[in-house]
Amino acid sequence: MADVRKALESERELEKEFVAEALRSETQPKGWPAALLMFHLSMWRERLRDALTEFRHARPYAAPPENIDEVNDGELASGIGTPLEDAAARSDQLLTELIALADDLGDRPFKWFTASTTFEALLRNSYTHPRLHIFKYLRENGEHDRAYGMLEDAVSEMREVSAPAIALGTALYCLACARALEDRVDEALELLVEAFPLRSDLKEAALRDPDLESLQDNPGFKALVS
């Protein structure tokens, strides 16, 4: 069984370091500021917390919204101006509640986007999702080594905790995208070779992924996505 608690606690530490650094040095960031990023994470953690709480009591739970962009746009507008300390504290409290629910529920059938179990949903919501947003923030603001290292750590951690295939496949795919952006083509292809059997649905996404644009004419890539 996957050690979801260990993965989520690792993500908690990463987010604390990210917030602490942003409080020290953020001035005029490109893209979302750290406060809005953490606000966004808290809204999605709250949504999953509520669903898992209802599920725990064998009651119907609200499915995630179909139009994610519309929901995000509305929520982000309401989050503008939230202090980083407040947004981070709220997100961390919700992560604490999700970890408690993971301990209580264990891994059980549960549908949430592409996730089919509680553990898959928790890793998607509170490990992969925040890590990708922080990766984008760091990369947009010139911290490439730190950003890429974070995705390398994600693959290592998903292996270490025996993560479900969907979670490990996502981590491998994201690192492949990073390798492609670094023009490390052979490594990117090797990662995709491992990722696609775990997440076959990502083949179609890979054809449109701007991070993989440098691979589009590569014969090896074409063979993988065919």
Image (spheres, rainbow, N blue to C red):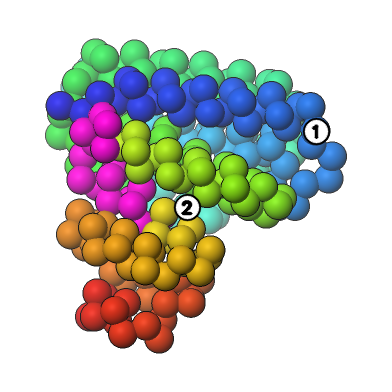
Is residue 210 in sight in this rendering?
Answer: yes
On-image quarter of the N terminus:
top left
Q: Residue at position x 20%, y 45% from top?
A: 165
Q: Which residues are magenta?
A: 159-174
Q: Position of residue 36 (x, y in %)?
A: 67, 38
Q: Secondary structure at mark 2?
A: helix
Could you tell me which secondary element the residue under label 1 belongs to?
A: helix
Residue at image x 79%, y 36%? 26
Please, is residue 38 above or below residue 144 in the view?
above
Q: Amino acid at mark 1?
A: Ser
Q: Residue at x 36, y 27 (%)?
A: 7
Q: Quick one: 114 or 12, which is closer to the camera?
A: 12
Q: CA distance from mark 1 to mark 2?
A: 31 Å
Residue 75 appears in the figure: no
Name which residue lies at 54% across and 54% down: 70
| Magenta stretch: includes residue 103 | no
Q: Is residue 173 magenta?
A: yes
Which three-letter amino acid code belongs to the residue tagged 2? Ile
Of badges 1 and 2, nearer the viewer stands: 1
Residue at numbered disc 2: 68
- Above or below 83: residue 210: below
Name the outermost residue toward the right.
Answer: 27
- In the rendered image, which quarter is residue 42 located in? top right
At which x and y percent is residue 101? Answer: 31, 17
Q: Which residue is mark 1?
A: 25
Q: Residues within 10 Å of mark 2 (few under 14, many from 20)?
A: few
Q: Quadrant of residue 89?
A: top right
> Do labels 1 and 2 touch, CB within 8 Å?
no
150, above or below 226, in the image: above
Number of numbered tags placed on the structure image = 2
Viewer-proximal residue, 60 or 148? Answer: 148
